[in-house]
Amino acid sequence: MYKYIIHGQKKLKGEVVISGSKNASLPIMAASLLTKEEVILQNIPDLMDIQTMRQLLEMLGKKTVFENNTLSIKEIDPSLYEAPYDIVRKMRASIAVMGPLLARKGQAKISFPGGCAIGPRPIDIHLRGMKALGTDLLIEHGYIWAQAKELTGKQMDLMGNFGPSVLATENVMMAATLAKGITIIEGAAREPEISDLADCLISMGAKIKGSGTSIIEIEGVKELGGTSHTIIPDRIETGTFMAAAGTTGGEILLKKVNILHMEEVIEGFSKAGVEIEILSQDSLVARGKNIRPVEIETHPYPFFPTDLQAQLMALVSISDGTSVISEKIFPDRFMHAAELNRMGADIKVDGATALIKGVKNLSGAAVMASDLRAGAGLVVGALAARGKSEILRIYHIDRGYEKLDEKLRKIGADIERVPQ
Ligand code: EPU
């Protein structure tokens, strides 16, 4: 296990090339199960969750080769259909293989995902969607056994109590590509990662309309072919570097971004005092100015994302006023608040709302990452803090950021990865 040692208060200056989106890559990798032909994916970030998904695809009969951010996926054994506990417990996004397996092989055996550091994460919407397409489901011995002789298109509403579900929308969309007839998903999630998946599926021969809106229509086809597809930029990594520019009073040129996906994030960080200058469709400069308090709620896309809530909280913990951040997607996703308080922040969590009284300075401390984005929030805090911080359990950060420490070091951060 490794930890980061960060000596804070270094102004970050320079350029960072943003990697491909983790949350677009994972379902798109799963989509390769829908075809016997080769799928080639470019701009795949080199990070742990990608390795985990590769491992899962190999257990499901694929051969994968990953070089220079390009992943080739070829089929060697079409008969396999089990996603075991050992993989699913490491990465909940493994559930994304359910739709493709059912559509192509008529069955899937998937370990039932358990608890998670960001709160309860049920999968009822996924199951509802699969049932609507004609799947028989049995939950036994910690596994979901799903079977369908033939999937049949259906009109369904996938809205959940906390809004639409990203992975459930993706799962059902993938299953429906090979179902008989037309599927209409109402209450669909609208994240850019869903449109990226739809674009990839369309390039494989799928018939999909309406991705990026809350109603998606899929007309099933007999089979899908291979493709070559380039993954969209990671909007959460982009936002994380905006927060890092903000807390350090730095100036970071971010390249290979997609500003069309960043509207509310740019607005949120601008309100918090990060000056954002858009240079082109794929590049912008983020400058730390006077950090200001904000009142922000996280919501599904196109609104401010939950995956940047911890980083924003770290940023405004050194503003000159009181901020209110409410979490409307994962109401318990506040494990980082107590750790930021160890660094001298003044954060009180009440239900799904955090009240952050800005302090003049954070002070370096040993803290623990509880999940990926909480870990990123602690890095943002440590970059601003006086003195030395140690961030433990950075395997959470490694799950979702490509070479975060290297990228930060290149722009002037004093950050080291050492054995824990
Ligand atoms: N929900 C249900 N039932 C379901 C599925 C979801 O009630 O069957 C609820 C969730 O508990 C939550 C809300 O619906 O309250 C939205 O969750 P969603 O299903 O959209 O989350 P997800 O698809 O499992 C993806 C990202 C997460 C990101 C969320 C929200 C991937 C691989 N993961 O998860 O990313 O936080 O959407 O935007 O796309 C991360 O990258 O750190 C991460 C956790």
Image: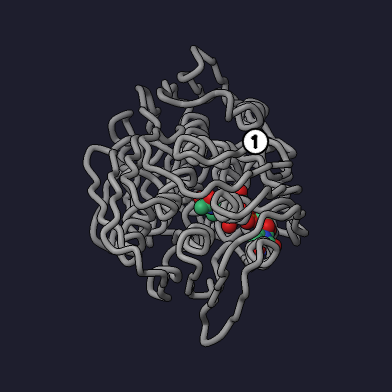
Q: Position of residue 267 (x, y in %)?
A: 66, 27
Q: Residue at x 48, y 43 (%)?
A: 24
Q: In which of the image's four quarters is ligand 1 placed?
A: bottom right
Quick check: 51 above or below 225? Answer: below
Q: Residue at x 63, y 27 (%)?
A: 263
Residue 364 visible in the snapshot: no
Q: Position of residue 162 (x, y in %)?
A: 74, 56
Residue 9 lies left or right of residue 411; in this view the side is right
The kind of residue tagged 1 is: Lys
Residue 339 lies left or right of residue 131; in this view the side is left
Residue that extends furthest to the top in the rendered view of this protein: 279
Q: Quadrant of the C terminus?
A: bottom left
Label 1 crowd bin: few (<14), some (14–19), many (20+), radius 10 Å: some
Name the residue nearer the viewer: 346 or 36. 36
The image quarter containing residue 277 is top right
Residue 240 visible in the snapshot: yes
Q: Position of residue 404 (x, y in %)?
A: 35, 42
Q: Residue at x 48, y 70 (%)?
A: 108
Q: Which residue is mark 1?
A: 209
Residue that extends furthest to the bottom in the rendered view of this protein: 141
Name the residue nearer the viewer: 332 or 106. 106
